[in-house]
Image (cartoon, coloured by chain):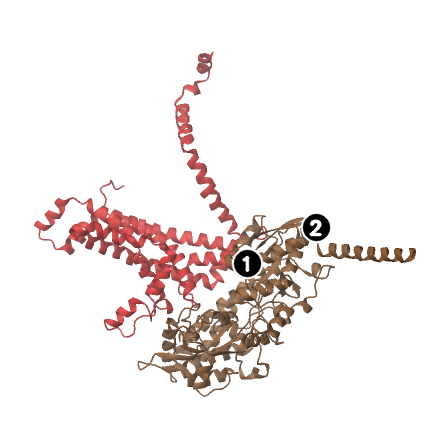
Chain colours: A red, B brown
Amino acid sequence: MLERFQFSNPFWTSKKWIRLKRFLFLFLLLSPWVLGWLLLFGYPTLNSLYISFTKFDITTKPVWVGFANYKFMFTQDPLFWIAVKNTLWIVIIGVPVQIVTALLITFLVSKSGRLRHVLQTVVLIPSFVPVVAGAMVFTYILNPIYGPVNAFLRLIGFSNPPMWFYDPQSSKWGLVFFGAWGVGTSIVIYSAALMRIPRQIDWLAQIDGLTEWRKAVRITFPLISPVIFYTLVVETIQQFQIFAKSYVVTAQVPDPENSMYFLATDVYNSGFKDFHFGYAAALGWALTILTGIFVALIFSTQRMWVFSNAKQD
Amino acid sequence: MKRKSIAVIAAISMVVLSACGSHSSSQSNEKANISIWYVWSGPSAKFIKDAISRFEQVNPGIQVTESENTTVDKFLAAINSGKGPDISVDMGLDNVARFCNSGMWLDLRQYLGSNDGIDLSKVFPASVLKGTSYKGIPCSLPLLTDTSGLFYNKTLLTNAGFSSPPKTTDDLITYSKKITKFNSDGSIRVAGYVPWTGYYSVYWSSPYASYMFGAPWYSSDGKSMLGTDTRWEQALTWQKDFIATVYGHGDYTKGSKALAKFVAGAGDEWGCAQDLQAGRTAMILDGEWRIGSVCPENKATKVSALNYGIAPMPVAPAMSSDYGFGPVGGPVMGITKSSKAPAAAWKLLKFLATDKTLMESGFKSLSQFPSTTASLDDISNGTSGSNWKEMISIIDNKNSGWRSTSIIGNKDQSIADGVFSEVQMNQLPNVTTMGFNAALHAELLKLAHQIDQYTLQDKH
């Protein structure tokens, strides 16, 4: 009976059915993840897109307003452009500072011989410190009067050290140094990448008489460039989302000129202080798109400086 | 004899029946489960928890669920989910206009005018009531209140030759010039008064400029007056002149830098190193909680006793006849639109707003003033000390109250404070090309426009 059924329905023996069966089986295996993704990411993402086109104060139902939120954002909200300027500043300055700091420390630690493992652990410690606690500590460290940083600067001859968080001209630099303090994770990644470089290359470089600097630039950097690329993308995304550091710092050091007001801060304030959740959603999308543009730009430069053994299409 | 017996029985019956009647009027039989959310937590919340327990005893049919440590964003999110509280408490008056306007808090007129209502003007001082309603619609009741005044170091003033506190903003400059002392390197050792946005939690800022100079926030049609009323420019020009004259010896830039460094070295506001306590600043605007925070002398930790006085905040010379008033306003509470038992919620709201024991324990535990006239009179007539009485006289002043707010909450203050900071840091945009006055005017106009834009966003 089944045989007759199979012969009269060639689909069940066809390659299409075999492929479909395979697909359904894979989907079944992936379904928990797919469902989770849809529930926890897909649906909220689409919902936030919808909310961004509404006026929604969370106490009444969302009211469709079309592009009004986006129009307000680009043409009438001065805080938005302050936030964009500050966010771009912290990304363009902060990310390179963090990567260069991590690379420098990695190279120094790699030359420390037996102390290498100890130093790798020591430089990782700041990464364990919660951001809130770190921000409170840095507010003290960079206090222009009491803080040890300015005390040291005065000791070495700077009679007028920066006011750090107390001056809009230097406040973001304070955040940059705070960010550079916590590059331990990047150091671990770079150290692992350095360890993968064959020792023979080191020896050959010595034989050829390359200086440390030329070796770093011509050999080491290209070989670990994929890892640097990875950290560049991750740090860029993280810096675009900077919030907790500036939020905690400005809770202790008022910032009436909004020098530490970033896009993520704008999203938070618009939603949870001004109760404009529709507008906050629109700001969130603006932040996402801006981040995406920068990441795409980084990817577009990949061919120019990222060395890879993989086949380039 | 028989008539006498009947009369006695009738009299006893009347007494018993009237007792039953009064018992039923003080003990409600209404059954409901209601919830209240507030910000206090731990020992700070004891005063309200005890009050709620007393309420439940008097209203055995009403069960109250409390949630402490909840802020505005939390109860708004809860309301949106349909599980919001019946009563929510906000720590200040800045959101009243927004909550009244949006219906987040119910219009209380239906309850105030009922048999179970209260006459607000008889229960609360006028200054406390200001700001608890919006466009004449009361949607909140006060739950304790705050005021602020000028705390001054009597010793430092006396040493400089002053026997009474300053009354005008011109006096503040005169006093500060004599009191301020500098170190040999030009840094400030002792400051008179510090007109700096961000210096402690009660600081020279846009709200205080509006109080001290009478600068209005909004016109009758809701437009920002920041750029059009010249009193704002007067306030900021005064700030600039103060910094230049007192801290820069005539040099605005020098004064700004010196003051920025001085503020950066401020002692912990809630400890014994606070600048007024430590003798670092002679005069400071602060709230009544400062009275409870003053540290006694402690030789072991090198804390000196503080010989201080309190006075109303100084005002612009044009307002000197109004001297004696100050900002008044504190926590407020309302019945939320998500309430399923608003009538029962009203009972609790009224109870908390008028309970004498709550007022007394809030005053003792939080150093925060009661919001009812009766409790304030008790403190005034009691033995709490002249400092409390001085601050109560500010609450009693007919001109006292909270600044006018709008449906954008305190966003207007956040925007306006930006120009105060620009002035104190000598970073006003275009000041080198336009000159201070023109640059200030342009900046105020720009900020007024921003405030109007946000107001429009909220309206639409």
Chain of the residue where label 2 is placed in the rendered structure: B
The secondary structure type at the circle numbered 2 is loop
Q: Of tags 2 and 1, which is closer to the observer?
A: 1
For badge 2, the amino acid type reads Glu
* Residue position marked by numbered label 2 in the rendering: B30
Vertical relation: A113 (above or below) B139: above
Describe residue A146's horizontal placement relative to residue B224 as left or right.
left
For badge 1, the amino acid type reads Lys
Q: Determine if marks 2 and 1 fall on one subunit.
A: yes
Q: Residue at x 56, y 62 (%)?
A: B95
Q: Position of residue A83 (x, y in %)?
A: 42, 61
Name the one closer to the observer, B313 or A183. Answer: B313
Name the one closer to the observer, B37 or A235. Answer: B37
Describe residue A141's horizontal placement relative to residue A248 as left or right.
left
Q: Position of residue B453 (x, y in %)?
A: 53, 64
- Residues packed near mark 2 inside 10 Å, few (<14), some (14 to 19) or many (20 plus): few
* Residue position marked by numbered label 1 in the rendering: B46
Name the one closer to the observer, B353 or B296. Answer: B296
- Residues packed near mark 1 inside 10 Å, few (<14), some (14 to 19) or many (20 plus): some
CA–CA distance in space, label 2 to label 1: 26 Å
| The N terminus of chain B, quarter of image | bottom right
